[in-house]
Image (spheres, rainbow, N blue to C red):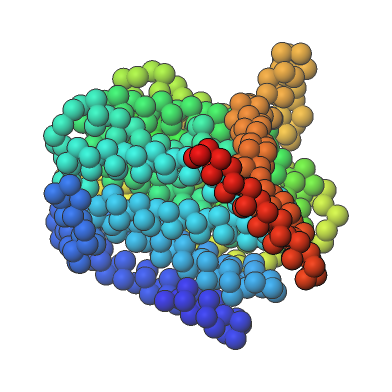
Amino acid sequence: MAFWLNIAFGRRLGLGSAYVAVAASLMAAVLAVLVFCTLPPGGAAYELVPWITINGHPITVGVMVDSLTVMMLLVVTVVGTLIQIYSIGYMAGDVRFSRYFAYISLFMASMLALVLADNLLMLYIFWEGVGLCSCLLVAFWYEKPAAAAAGVKAFVTTRVGDTGLLVGILILLASGHSLRFADMGGLPGSDVLMAVAALLIFLGAMGKSAQFPLHVWLPDAMEGPTSVSALIHAATMVAAGVYLVARSYVLFTAHPLALETVAVIGAISAVMAASIACTANDIKKVLAYSTVSQLGLMMLALGAGGYAAGTFHLMTHAFFKALLFLGAGSVIHAVHTQDIREMGGLIHKMKVTGITFIIGALALAGIMPFAGFWSKDEIFIALWQGGDPVLFGAAVLTSFLTAFYMARVIFLTFLGTSRSKAHAHESPSVMTFPLVVLAVFAAGLGFIGSPWCHGAFQNFITGADEEVHFNLGMIAFSTALSLGGIGLAYLLIVKGVKLPGSDGPGRAWFIRLVANKYYIDEIYEVLLIQPFHRLCGALMRFDITRVDGAVNGVAASAAALARFVRRLQTGRVENYLLMQAGGALLLLLIILGKLCRIF
């Protein structure tokens, strides 16, 4: 409703268009809380409207409400509402102010409908709606070539994954299976075929959640407004991929190959993106690669059997990553640059932004007792119990690098002396209020999954009733790991210490490799984009010379015949009489020839 009101009357409403969007989002948040309070044990599914029947299976428009749904509803509505409030200040004065809030409302509606869908086909419809809205918002400032290109890149890259998701759905339909999530347990049919379907569904999740090798669109998506980046990275698009794997988890657990693939891709994405974030100097791109890395950790946890750990980190990450992006937006709003090398000392002029950003960074780095510490520890425990040292090592390295690059951002942006030429100032209260609220969540939300709350989140999300205990060894290990990353950043950034061999040619080569994002974009350019352009050029030439040539040749022949016939139409009577006489003479000769043959 907010989308239609703002599309139809947004220009007339002016600032009121923001109030319409915020009111709708706030109402959705209230309803989400009511659903949480009235959720029956085990959840419920409601078939609302019969739709179509495919291969003997009726498809209905319905909703599925269980603990996973409720968790996502609360995350999307609460975080989305705070981001929209922030946007009132951040987008003030923009010529397309009302259109922005229309797109945001459609984005929220698509994500909420995706979460509520009770079957894969309905999820896919709103999945595409989320993709469309992300393209519209990433390319919101389309007059900038970089923004327009980023929107196209996001749309095309995620379409690769979405194609896999669609084919996976079609395989399930062709095999005579129900698409309802409630019926996914114990699907009949070929194990190989079902494993392929699960892998294709995961391909869709890889595209949306920017997992290797389909991660290349997410850093470029930073060309959009920072508030959009916060929404995409925290509560909507990239969360949809992890949600899809969690929602289809029964299908994945039934096929170990698919589950192992989820874990391996998650591990690669987590380590690769974290290493790139260590070399990035654009504050938004540091956070963008951080998102890819943290989503990789969630996938890694799910792939290793840590369903509760993966979904717990999905929830906590939404709040502190939204806080970090909005804090980055506040910094950019003040100093008019995104390069952390041109900042410094901002904590003195932007106390609210600085303190809340540091809280979000500590949560992301996994420092006790902030939210990220508890969810990261759950992932460590799940991986340790899984018994795979490589996957556990990937999570450990990711955690260390995360603490390092977030400490690097803090030291270069908020501490030390100012290197900015701009006169930094604190953002208006409409922007700082959401920062404070999100900081409270980033600081305290993790306790609901801690032993102090008896693992309330884990029991809620799994429906179990198990006691959660402190693992002091893991707590000490993860804390030392995070502090080690922060300490290394302090030595390198603040103290200027050079590591042994840090100036060697081997290190320079490795730094270039990481700083250039492992040349994955360049590889795509050589292996995919340029050959595709050459193929399109060849097809265009074939179309012009052969297809158009044939069609144009027929037209040219008709035109030539018309020109010849036109010469016979002179308009002079004597010419016509001469032609008649000639024709009569020719006819007479033909008749005489026939008669001669007869006689």
Q: Would you identify the image quadrant in which residue 112 lies? A: bottom left
- Position in image of residue 489 (x %, y %): 66, 32
Q: Residue at x 24, y 25 (%)?
A: 192
Picture layout, residue 110 above or below residue 102: above
Residue 229 visible in the picture:
yes
- Position in image of residue 558 (x %, y %): 65, 52
Q: Which residue reaches farthest bottom? A: 12
Q: Would you identify the image quadrant in which residue 455 lies? A: top left
Q: Would you identify the image quadrant in which residue 24 lies? A: bottom left
Q: Nearer the viewer, residue 149 or 438?
A: 149
Q: Residue at x 49, y 40 (%)?
A: 598
Q: Is residue 157 left or right of residue 150?
A: left
Q: Nearer the viewer, residue 155 or 373?
A: 155
Q: Is residue 413 left or right of residue 238?
A: right
Q: Which residue reaches farthest right? A: 421
- Position in image of residue 484 (x %, y %): 56, 29
Q: Nearer the viewer, residue 271 or 206?
A: 206
Picture layout, residue 40 above or below residue 344: below
Q: Residue at x 71, y 60 (%)?
A: 581
- Position in image of residue 385 (x %, y %): 29, 25
Quadrant containing the N terminus is: bottom left
Residue 374 visible in the picture:
no
Q: Nearer the viewer, residue 140 or 369?
A: 140
Q: Residue at x 36, y 44 (%)?
A: 166
